[in-house]
């Protein structure tokens, strides 16, 4: 169970390491948005997110992160996380918006691994 926003982000990292695409997608809200790359259009909905994540999962990467801050406002939270994705050699600072579900678990509503980074 993801009882707080940070636990949801940490569960996502566990899913990547395990190559568990189904469990990773289950951490997202049905109407979630995911930014797969700074220069790519955002994708919306679980099917599109599954497709975007499948490429990352194929490499069986290790996502390590440091939660920089969490701001909660009722049933909404912002999580900022500095991360590294090996062996892909990617790094960034994410800005993720999560929403508390009726059962108390937190789910990802907006996943922007690139945070404020913009394409040139």
Image (spheres, helix red, strand yellow):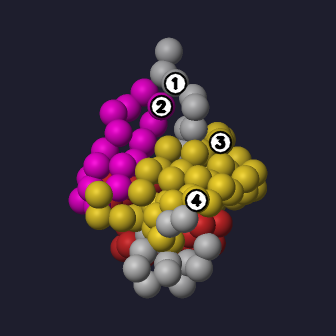
Asked whether disc 3 touches disc 4, contact meaning CB atoms under 8 Å apart, the reply is no
Between circles 3 and 4, the one closer to the viewer is 4
Secondary structure beneath label 2: loop
Mark 2, residue position: 38
Tell me if label 3 and label 1 are in contact, CB under 8 Å. no
Of mark 2 and mark 3, the one earlier in the sequence is 2
Task: Assign a secondary structure to mark 1.
Answer: loop
Nearest to N terminus: mark 2 or mark 4: 2
User: What span is in magenta?
Assistant: 32-48
Q: Quadrant of residue 89?
A: top right
Q: Residues within 10 Å of mark 3 (few under 14, many from 20)?
A: many
Residue at 61 percent of width and 73 percent of height: 4
Q: Earlier in the sequence, mark 1 or mark 2?
A: 2
Residue beneath disc 1: 118
- Give yes or no for contact between labels 1 and 2 (Cβ–Cβ under 8 Å): yes
Q: Residues within 10 Å of mark 4 (few under 14, many from 20)?
A: few
- Characterize the local packing of mark 1: few (<14), some (14-19) or many (20 or more) Cα atoms within 10 angstroms: few
Disc on res. 93: 3
Q: Is residue 117 above or below residue 80?
A: above
């Amino acid at each position: 169970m993801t009882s707080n926003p940070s636990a949801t982000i940490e569960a996502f990292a566990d899913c990547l390491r395990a190559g568990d695409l189904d469990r990773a997608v289950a951490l997202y809200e049905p109407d979630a948005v995911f930014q797969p790359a700074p220069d790519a259009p955002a994708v919306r909905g679980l099917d599109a997110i599954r497709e975007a994540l499948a490429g990352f999962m194929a490499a069986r990467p290790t996502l390590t992160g440091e939660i920089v801050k969490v701001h909660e406002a009722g049933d909404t939270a912002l999580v900022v996380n500095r991360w590294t994705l090996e062996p892909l050699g990617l790094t960034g600072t994410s800005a993720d918006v999560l929403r508390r579900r009726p059962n108390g678990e937190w789910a990802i509503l907006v996943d922007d691994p690139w945070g404020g980074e913009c394409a040139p």
